[in-house]
Amino acid sequence: MRRAWLIASAGTTLGIGAGGPPVKNALAVEALQVPPSTNGAPQMIGGPCQPSQGLQALKDPAVNRGTATRQERRVQRGMQGLLPPQVTSLQTEIDRAHVAIARCCSPLEKYQAIMGLRESSWDTFYGLLSQHIKEYLPIIYTPTVGEACQKWSSLLHRPQGLYISEEDTGAVKQRLEAWPERDVRVVVLTDGQRILGLGDLGCNGMGIPVGKVTVHTAAAGIHPRWTLPIALDVGCDTQGVREDPLYVGLNQERARGSAYNRLVDELLGALKARYGPRVLIHWEDFGAGNAFRLLTKYQEQGYTTFNDDIQATAAVTLGSLYGAQRQEGVPKLADQTFLFFGAGQANIGAAQLLTLALAQQGLSAADARSRIWLMDSQGIVYEGRKGGLSPQKAAFARPARDAELAQAAGTDLDRAVELVGPDSLIGAAAKGGAFSEKVVKAITKSVQQRHGQSARPAIFALSNPVEEAECTAQQAYDWSEGRAVYVSGTAFPGVERRDGTQFTPGQCNNCLIFPGIALGVIGVGAQMVTDAMMLAASKALSGCVTAEELRDESVLPRIERLREVALKVGAAVSLEALSSEIASDSEADSRKSLRGGLGRASKLIDIEAHLRQLQYDPFNGVAG
Ligand SMILES: O=C([O-])CC(=O)C(=O)O
Ligand SMILES: [Mg+2]
């Protein structure tokens, strides 16, 4: 079939392949109200001018709605006979999927069934997620996605993203052309080196960007067409992964140095050339040695980019600290001492953002840093420690006068807590069980000594998946005699109080932040992702927490409110981009009121309305 691609200007209505945001049905082909392109690329809408027919159409997840396909559509697209005669609502299709998935016996079986649905019908899949997000988020995302990555090589998939391997060096542009979509706005990229807390899974890490783009759509309504998951395969240093005869990746040690850099550079250049200068690059689960370096390098080169594990995790951690402050007994942020256990991307990012938050509360940068202690596998980080420090750790190294204390603590966390006397303990070291009874008792005692009997420590066990968590919610509660304000990276079941009542602490996962960042950036065509935008996101997140959630010991909004939270975070991010003049001119000009003289609250409402218009809604698609 001859294929022709349509190039559209913002706001026009075109006949194209199905699946975009809603609209009129002119010319007996799907019509799409083309949302304004904010990535600076010519807006080419993917899809042949002639819509696919019959079985071909039903194999397209953007078109297929199963029995919810309208009769006229069945006739137009030659689908009669290929579908059972009953024409139902999308709700019936969703209910059918729900029943079918409920038959699966394990989380991994559910993962396979639901991801199969994603490959078969976007509207049914995202409709199902919108109605059952609490049930399915732990399947499509952490923790089950971790198990899926560990077993990726023995799962059956249809292509869900792009694999770019070291062998593609020199031909990345051509590989990128295999991806059918012309208007991609968010690329989630991993090299698989540090998948959750599971280590180097190489090419099997693909499950993570696939899960993240799914959450971009489910939470922020980023259209599935606008997202592209990429696994960069440069090898894998985990012997066990490579020895699996079914392993799908390159059977080699990880490429490093110039070979690695050349491939990343070529990929980033190709993405920019194909999708425009403002395509959002979301880095995910890179090793610490590359994560900071690549982020800085491509920020400096003018890419619109953020690292989820550094910046979005930082924003949700800071959001949790803001939320914790709203609980009675928790000292104000500016009066606290913070001990970060683990000095990897998550905790360094959180320490960096916290420094900015404290500066906003009037502390000098030096004073802010003096409240922060970092502890890694060699103990407390201090100036002049043997073996040297990375620049990121060096920024938080304790002055030489603390060397003696650090040496006395050694690598014992309970000793460090006794000596430092923190009010907040933030664990992100992927050391399951590191917050022992002794540690929890020591921090509870130290907070009470400094701030009085009713004071409460913040204990954050952020490592993923669940077996890597530093302590469970129940342990934190029991060992602190009910005082700990607790959050975890992966959801825990409810905690039983001594009086028999239950409560459920919040889940401090970057999924409360990254979808809103993408929505906020895309919504105004922001040219970069700044720390100020991350701070704005944290504040918006903690602003979403309700009094009822606080009463239920959740200092973060409930995960089932993901979509509502993404919109609030997105609006705050867009507003920050507009105020600091980093929104693209064309987009901001088309929405003068967003820049205009309205008050902050009215502007936020106006921006939310604008962002809502851009969101994909499975119940309002064109495919039916
Ligand atoms: O994926 C998650 O649940 C959070 C995350 O980014 C990580 O742990 O690397
Ligand atoms: Mg991650």
Image (cartoon, helix red, strand yellow):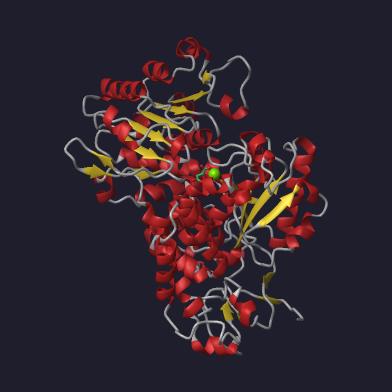
Q: Position of residue 220 (x, y in %)?
A: 48, 60
Q: Position of residue 179 (x, y in %)?
A: 70, 63
Q: Position of residue 546 (x, y in %)?
A: 29, 51
- The answer to whether residue 598 of the structure is visible from this angle is no
Residue furthest left in the image:
499
Q: Name the image quarter holding the N terminus.
A: bottom right
* Up/down of 468 relative to 378, above or below: below
Q: Position of residue 315 (x, y in %)?
A: 47, 43
Q: Residue at x 53, y 74 (%)?
A: 21
Tell me which corner region of the image, top left, top right, bottom left or bottom right, holds residue 120: bottom right
Q: Nearer the viewer, residue 162 or 328?
A: 162
* Up/down of 403 relative to 217, above or below: above
Whereabouts is ligand 2, in terms of quadrant?
A: top right
* Up/down of 614 relative to 262, above or below: below
Q: Nearer the viewer, residue 32 or 244?
A: 244
* Up/down of 211 relative to 29, above or below: above
- The answer to whether residue 158 of the structure is visible from this angle is yes
Instruction: Tell whether 107 sits left or right of 50.
Output: left
Across the whole image, how many numbered discs are drawn on residues? 0
